[in-house]
């Protein structure tokens, strides 16, 4: 695994409190040389801002002084490779794209994009400023397709060592590979191999799904129904088969009537990998965009997940969930996008150099 620049830290570090995801569409005529200019600008901005220095020509350099664990991650959509005339270098999964799932109610305004910026920090002012700087430098090359803003219980408010909660109140983030372990590297980073375009070795695939959550109907459920839906206890996130949050669920256990203690349609039973090749890194953020026209909360989860091969690791899990997860009653995917995150770089290089050249 090569050196990971600040942009790869955006995948391997514990989630920051605030994140903004911006998808850009390239302007007509933006070709490979133009893309090299763009990624050089963005790389320099990210280098500076993630170490508390102002970007060149930053109109508000005062705001760069507090990096607050700032990371900025770039993802390349299939449209970027097309614009660069490099489709032959695209991994198969990026060419195929994700299949549709029966639960999807996808909207264009939350889906797709040629270039992803994932900007995250523990300070919302830092995020706002960094996004503004990056978008100013990208303006000549691209237009904004969508913007999604998410948050997490941050350092300072979350009791240390305690997993965060999503807007359903569930402990969310328990089962995940641990950064810095060989296991994490296998699940997340793309290894060299005959099926892998060489430029992507050390990079990853990033899927972002905007999933609306019906907080009103969920809120009307009793604790038991909520726990049956997920397969874990609300109070502490422990599996319904007992122990603490980190105890492994016992999927074989049955109750006095012979029914599985962790229900057949519960989220964790269906999301649990059926083989070691089905694991993913989850790095979701909550979103809350105020109140919808019908008076209900416009809220949910920016489900962000990374893995070396989305077709092998993510799609089968998502298909099982789409088929039977009881959580689907209260959740609806309304946006979806897929990106190739280029590998980390050495000082002096720019992001995407292994694809776009210099
Ligand atoms: C709004 C939608 C969702 C909510 C509220 C949600 C919530 C949760 C919660 C509370 C857990 C248990 C605690 C934990 O391990 O973090 C969990 C586990 C998990 N979820 Fe989700 N989730 C959602 C969507 C998804 C999607 C779309 C996928 C993948 C396609 C997914 C994959 C997983 C996986 C792999 C686990 C761990 C399973 C295991 O124990 O092995 N989730 N989720």
Image: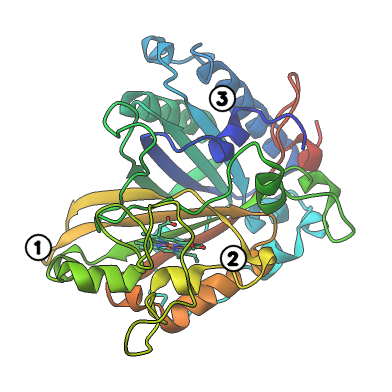
Q: Residues within 10 Å of mark 2 (few under 14, many from 20)?
A: many
Queried on whether the Cβ of the residue with tag 2 lies below 8 angstroms from ligand 1, the answer reads yes
Q: Residues within 10 Å of mark 3 (few under 14, many from 20)?
A: many
Rounded to the nearest angstrom, the CA distance separating label 1 from label 2 is 34 Å
Q: Quadrant of residue 15?
A: top left
Q: Of the numbered discs in the image, which one, if any, rests on residue 46?
A: 3
Q: Residues within 10 Å of mark 1 (few under 14, many from 20)?
A: few
Q: As drawn, is 8 to the left or to the right of 50?
A: right
**Do tag 2 and tag 3 residues touch (Cβ < 8 Å)?**
no
Q: Please tell me whether mark 1 or mark 2 is closer to you in this view.
A: 2
Q: Earlier in the sequence, mark 3 or mark 1?
A: 3
Residue at x 61% of width, y 61% of height: 279
Q: Which residue is mark 1?
A: 295
Q: Quadrant of residue 61?
A: top left
Q: As drawn, is 262 to the left or to the right of 308?
A: left
Is 22 drawn above or below residue 111 in the view shown? above
Residue at x 69% of width, y 65% of height: 277
x then y, percent, for residue 184: 65, 46
Dot 2 lies on which element?
Answer: loop
Q: As drawn, is 289 to the left or to the right of 89?
A: left
Rounded to the nearest angstrom, the CA distance separating label 3 from label 1 is 39 Å
Dot 3 lies on which element?
Answer: helix
Q: Residue furthest bottom?
A: 257
Q: Residue furthest front?
A: 256
Q: Which residue is mark 2?
A: 314
**133 or 179: which is nearer to us?**
179
x then y, percent, for residue 206: 58, 52
x then y, percent, for residue 287: 30, 50
Ligand 1 shows up in the quarter that is bottom left
Is 68 drawn above or below residue 260 in the view shown? above
């Amino acid at each position: 695994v090569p050196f990971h620049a600040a942009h790869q830290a955006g995948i391997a570090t514990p989630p920051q409190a605030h994140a903004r995801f911006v998808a850009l569409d390239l302007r007509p005529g933006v070709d490979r040389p133009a893309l090299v200019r763009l990624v050089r600008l963005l790389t320099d901005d990210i280098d500076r801002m993630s170490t508390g220095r102002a970007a060149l020509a930053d109109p508000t350099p005062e705001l760069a002084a507090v990096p607050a664990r700032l990371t900025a991650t770039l993802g390349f959509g299939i449209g970027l490779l097309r614009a660069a005339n490099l489709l032959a270098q695209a991994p198969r999964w990026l060419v195929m794209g994700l299949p549709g799932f029966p639960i999807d109610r996808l909207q264009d305004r939350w889906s797709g994009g040629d270039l992803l910026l994932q900007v995250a920090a523990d300070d919302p002012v830092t995020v706002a400023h960094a996004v503004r700087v990056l978008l100013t430098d990208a303006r000549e090359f691209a237009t904004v397709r969508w913007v999604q803003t998410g948050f997490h219980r941050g350092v300072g408010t979350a009791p240390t060592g305690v997993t965060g909660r999503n807007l359903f109140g569930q402990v969310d983030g328990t089962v995940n590979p641990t950064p810095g372990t060989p296991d994490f590297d296998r699940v997340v980073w793309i290894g060299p191999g005959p099926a892998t375009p060489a430029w992507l070795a050390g990079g990853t695939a990033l899927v972002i799904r905007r999933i609306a959550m019906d907080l009103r109907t969920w809120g009307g459920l009793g604790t038991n129904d909520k726990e049956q839906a997920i397969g874990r206890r609300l109070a502490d996130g422990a599996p319904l088969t007992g122990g603490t949050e980190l105890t492994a669920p016992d999927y074989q256990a049955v109750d006095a009537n012979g029914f599985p203690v962790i229900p057949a349609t519960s989220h964790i039973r269906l999301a649990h990998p059926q083989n070691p090749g089905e694991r993913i890194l989850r790095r979701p953020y909550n979103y809350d965009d105020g109140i919808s026209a019908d008076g209900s909360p416009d809220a949910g989860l920016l489900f962000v997940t990374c893995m070396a091969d989305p077709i092998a690791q993510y799609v089968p899990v998502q298909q099982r969930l789409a088929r039977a997860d009881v959580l689907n009653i209260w959740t609806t995917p309304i946006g979806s996008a897929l990106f190739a995150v280029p590998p980390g770089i050495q000082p002096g290089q720019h992001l995407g150099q292994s694809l776009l050249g210099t």
